[in-house]
Structures are given as structure tokens and as C-alpha cells.
Image (cartoon, rainbow, N blue to C red):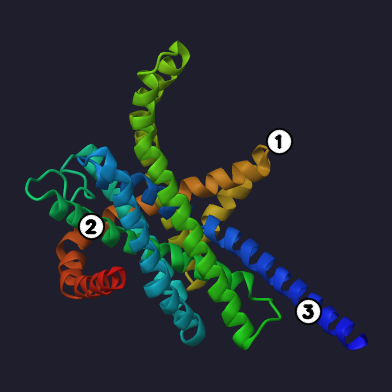
Amino acid sequence: MSGLIALLDDVAGIAKVAAASIDDVTGMAAKAGAKAAGAVIDDAAVTPKYVHGFSAKRELPIIWKIAKGSIFNKVVILLPIALLLSAFAPWAISPLLMLGGSYLCFEGAEKIYHAISPHGDPHDHYEGGTGDPAHLEEKKVSGAIKTDFILSAEIMTITLNEVTALMADSPLHGAAKFAMEAGVLFVVALAITAVVYGSVALIVKADDLGLAMAGGRSRLLAALGRGLVRLMPVLMKLLTIIGTAAMIWVGGNIIVHGLHELGWHTAYDWIHHQAEAAALAVPQAPGLVGWAVTAFFDGIIGLIWGLMLIPLSEYLIVPLARVTILPLMNAAKSLFRQGEA
């Protein structure tokens, strides 16, 4: 009997440790995932465009296909790469983070540039067109997954950087640290995918819900339905604006902090000084004012850097990507199709 009691006590102890580990993973995932807000909002704003032009019954299946591709991008391709970087090349995380921050700055600046001087939406690679609907759907899904891969890479890099910082003073080492990092990255990958594509599904089907309510017999429900239909284009526009601003702000913040870590402190110190001065000037809300000033100047730097990257991307980066990254993406897509089969 004493042996059984000792065994149960050991099991209870292991369960407590496991529960604590789950809490740690969840808490770290929440903190790390919050840093990827810019890429997450843009992902949610962009994806609904890929179901435009299809029948209502195909909208959710298309979103589900894109969501599965997003999980494949994050879990099968990017998570192992992130763990390998953490284990064997932690010095590469900051430069890669700056590369991702540069992409966010470029993407946000390009949207502003196209809004001022319209040349077509850079995300609408497959808008319009005629022919086989199944083939068009496949092209749309493929384009969405390629766009998601870039945003997912940024999300996972930001998460890895935050996890590394959060675990700097952790007593965990070796396999335990590796397992914790893997757990946090996995939770963030699934949670962000669920949040993004769950939100996209709600946004896409809101019009249908509004139309159904508008056709009902209840005057109140009909009025609410018509209001929902009118609200959705405004919401999408607002989401796009917020996503663009968030991308530029987050990208600029990454660039400023990356340069600071690499030894170039001018921008970081100047922005920090301005934020401190503004916080002292408004003692009623010093934290909020300091954050707002920091975000504003991070955004200005991000916008300037993004505008500088537009011609560089058009004449150098995109042609280079066509002969390097695109073949890798096509190979990953083939693996994904084989997995579905």
C-alpha cells in the first residue's frame, strides 16, 4: 500500500510539473505572439481578397485550404528552421529579424505608395480571369499560401526572438530548453493561424449573414442585417489601414532595435530621449504618451526605409527571388499536395 501511495505521489508531482510547463508555454506564447501583431493584422486583412469572385459555398473551403497551407508553412517548414537557428546559429536571429522587419516596412510603404499612385493592389495577383473555376481556385490558394509563407516567416522569427529573450534567465538547458522553445513556437503557430483564419471566415461570411437577416420578417433583424452589409466594406478598409500602420510601426521598431543591438545607437537613443521628454510633459499618462511617441517615430523610420526598398525590390530582390526562393516554395507546395493525397 505504501508503494502505491508513493507511486501516486510521484504521478501527482509529475502532473504538477507538466501543468506548470503548460502554463509557462502558454504564457510565453501569449507574450511572444503579441509582438507579431503587425504581420497578423495584415494577414487577416489580405486573405479575404483571395475568395473574392467565388460562390458563397466555396468561400469557407478555400479559407480552410489556405489555413492548412499556413499551418504547413509554420509547423513543417519554419518551426524546424527556427529551432535549428536557436540551437546552432543564435547570432543569425537578429539579422533575420531585421530582414523580416524590412519586409514589413516595404509591404506597408508599398501599400501607401499604391494608394497614392494606384498601379493595382500588389496582393491581387490572380484577380479576375476566366476559365476553369477549379484551376482558378487552385491558383488563388497557391498565391495566398505564398503570401502567408512570408508573413509566417516574420511571425515565427519575431516569436523566436521573444522566446530567446524571455528564456535568457531561465534555468532550463539542453533538451528541456529545446522542448520549451518548440512548445512555444508550436502554440504560437497554431493560435495565430486559428485567430487569423477564424477571423477571416467570420469577415467573409458576415455579408451572407447580413443578407439573410435583411430578408427576414423581423424589422429589427432586417435593419441589423442591412447595417451589417453596409458595415463590412468600412470594416475591411479600416482593417487594411490598421494593418498597414501596424506593419510599418512594427517593422520600424525592429529595424531601430536591431541597429541598436548591432552597435548603431543614434536612432534608438534619439527616439528614447523624445519619448522620455513627452512622458514628462504629460505626467497624467506617461506610459501611454511615451509608447505613442516611440511608435510614431518608429513608424516614420519604417516608412522611409520601406519607400527606399521599393525600387530595390523591383529591380534586384524580386528577380533574385524568382530564381532562388520560388523553386523552394514550389517544392514545399508539392510536398503539401502529397500530404493531402
Amino acid on which disc 1 is placed: Gln
Q: Which mark is residue 284?
A: 1
Amino acid on which disc 2 is placed: Gly
Crowd rating for badge 2 (residues with CA inside 10 Å; few <14, some 14–19, many 20+): some
Decide: marks 2, 3 in contact (CB < 8 A)? no
Which secondary structure, mark 1? loop
Q: Residue at x 41, y 78 (%)?
A: 81
N-term mark: 1 or 3? 3
| Residue at the left extreme, as displayed | 131
Q: In the picture, which quadrant includes the N terminus?
A: bottom right
N-term mark: 2 or 1? 2
Q: Position of residue 309 (x, y in %)?
A: 27, 59
Q: Position of residue 137 (x, y in %)?
A: 19, 52
Q: Is residue 180 left or right of residue 100?
A: right
Q: Position of residue 118 (x, y in %)?
A: 18, 39
Q: In the picture, which quadrant includes the C terminus?
A: bottom left
Which secondary structure, mark 2? helix
Q: Is residue 124 left or right of residue 162?
A: left
Q: Is residue 182 left or right of residue 70?
A: right
| Residue at the right extreme, as displayed | 2
Q: Residue at x 65, y 45 (%)?
A: 287
Q: Nearer the viewer, residue 270 or 124?
A: 124
Crowd rating for badge 1 (residues with CA inside 10 Å; few <14, some 14–19, many 20+): few
Q: Residue at x 47, y 14 (%)?
A: 220
Q: Which mark is residue 143?
A: 2
Q: Nearer the viewer, residue 74 or 100?
A: 74
Residue designated by label 3: 11
State the CA–CA distance, disc 2 to disc 3. Answer: 49 Å
Image height of 190 relative to 236, above or below: below
Crowd rating for badge 3 (residues with CA inside 10 Å; few <14, some 14–19, many 20+): few
Q: Residue at x 60, y 86 (%)?
A: 175
